[in-house]
């Protein structure tokens, strides 16, 4: 039987492209969405590609939703072989501008959702000594960026979680990888900008010119270096078939160049090997 992949955040962008691409590569795919009324684009893309998807409801910010979804999948399938943590929530603004409610939602989706979903699938992978967990974070999980305070904080947390888990998981037969996109042209980015407009325009003194300047320069970066959701999906599919995948993958040379300004080994393999050696018995 084909291996089974569960992908989160499939209503658009990277998640949609990844679900369809994995199905095209021969995986059985459970594509999940927080709101099933927004599945039209996913269905249309799957039909266009000539692939079949199993579509399920999953709100990663709700632990009860995670429990229901995973229990339902495992009741119908032998195992989940690949988890792709992709669902995300974007919020722009500085510490002074982001509301407590927006901060909580950012972490509920981007961090606690990843934590709880990983925790739900890991026991089965550990028992089988086989499985893969691929988490789409962001270059913002490695390098903090202006007016991305909450988003980068959550992505930094995910990076730390997965970097800590990876050497232990590998000793148990489970591969953990992080995918770190730079600028990507998706509905997620447009939606984040739209819903953050009022926050960025708030009357906190001293920010207006900084916001305008940063927005203009960011638009130039997206225009010159922006990727598509399909570009990132191709990388996720490649990682899913890699015999010994890296811990970290930047999705473009532009993103890799920024990471190199901060990290000597952007693949993360040296860290993985360092702590993996400490987990093994000395002979």
Image (cartoon, rainbow, N blue to C red):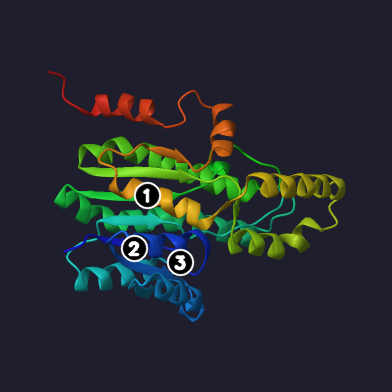
Q: Residue at x 75, y 59 (%)?
A: 199
Judging depth in this view, the residue of 202 and 143 nearest the camera is: 143
Measure the alpha-carbon separation of dots 3 and 1: 15 Å
Q: Position of residue 140 (x, y in %)?
A: 58, 43
Circle 2 residue: 24
Q: Position of residue 60 (x, y in %)?
A: 44, 64
User: Relative to 252, is 100 above or below?
Assistant: below
The answer to whether the residue labelled 3 contacts the one labelled 2, judged by CB atoms less than 8 Å apart, is no
| N-terminal label among 1 and 2 | 2
Q: Secondary structure at mark 1?
A: strand
| Dot 2 crowding, Cα within 10 Å, few <14, some 14–19, many 20+ | some
The C terminus - image quarter: top left
User: Relative to 18, is 161 above or below?
Assistant: above
Q: Quadrant of residue 116?
A: bottom left
Q: Position of residue 108 (x, y in %)?
A: 50, 59
Left or right, residue 182 beside residue 83:
right
Q: Secondary structure at mark 3?
A: loop
Say the numbered circle drawn on residue 134.
1
Q: Secondary structure at mark 2?
A: helix
Q: Quadrant of residue 30?
A: bottom left
| Dot 1 crowding, Cα within 10 Å, few <14, some 14–19, many 20+ | many
The answer to whether the residue labelled 3 contacts the one labelled 1, judged by CB atoms less than 8 Å apart, is no
Left or right, residue 124 beside residue 222:
left
**Residue mark closest to the camera, 3 vs 2:** 2
| N-terminal label among 3 and 1 | 3
| Dot 3 crowding, Cα within 10 Å, few <14, some 14–19, many 20+ | many
Measure the alpha-carbon separation of dots 1 and 2: 18 Å
Say the numbered circle drawn on residue 260.
none
| N-terminal label among 3 and 2 | 3
User: Relative to 269, is 152 above or below?
Assistant: below
Q: Residue at x 29, y 55 (%)?
A: 82
Circle 3 residue: 10
């Amino acid at each position: 039987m084909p291996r089974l992949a569960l992908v989160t955040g499939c209503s658009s962008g990277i998640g949609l492209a990844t679900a369809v691409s994995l199905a095209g590569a021969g995986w059985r795919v459970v594509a999940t969405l927080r709101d099933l009324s927004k599945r039209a684009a996913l269905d249309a893309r799957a039909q266009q590609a000539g692939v079949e998807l199993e579509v399920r409801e999953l709100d990663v910010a709700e632990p009860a939703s995670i429990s229901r979804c995973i229990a339902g999948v495992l009741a119908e399938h032998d195992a989940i072989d690949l988890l792709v943590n992709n669902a995300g929530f974007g919020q722009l603004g500085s510490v002074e501008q982001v509301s407590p409610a927006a901060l909580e939602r950012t972490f509920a989706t981007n961090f606690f959702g990843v934590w709880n979903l990983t925790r739900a699938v890991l026991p089965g992978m550990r028992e089988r000594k086989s499985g893969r967990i691929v988490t789409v974070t962001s270059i913002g999980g490695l390098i903090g960026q202006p007016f991305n305070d909450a988003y980068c904080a959550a992505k930094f947390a995910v990076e730390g979680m997965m970097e800590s888990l990876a050497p232990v998981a590998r000793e148990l037969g489970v591969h953990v990888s992080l995918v770190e996109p730079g600028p990507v042209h998706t509905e997620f980015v447009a939606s984040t900008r739209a819903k953050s407009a009022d926050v960025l325009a708030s009357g906190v003194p001293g920010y207006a010119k900084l916001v305008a300047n940063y927005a203009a320069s960011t638009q130039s970066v997206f225009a010159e270096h922006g990727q598509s959701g399909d570009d990132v999906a191709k990388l996720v599919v490649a990682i899913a078939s890699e015999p010994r995948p890296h811990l970290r993958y930047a999705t473009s040379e532009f993103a890799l160049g920024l990471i190199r300004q901060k990290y000597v080994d952007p693949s993360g393999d040296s860290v993985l090997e360092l702590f993996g050696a400490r987990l093994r018995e000395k002979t």
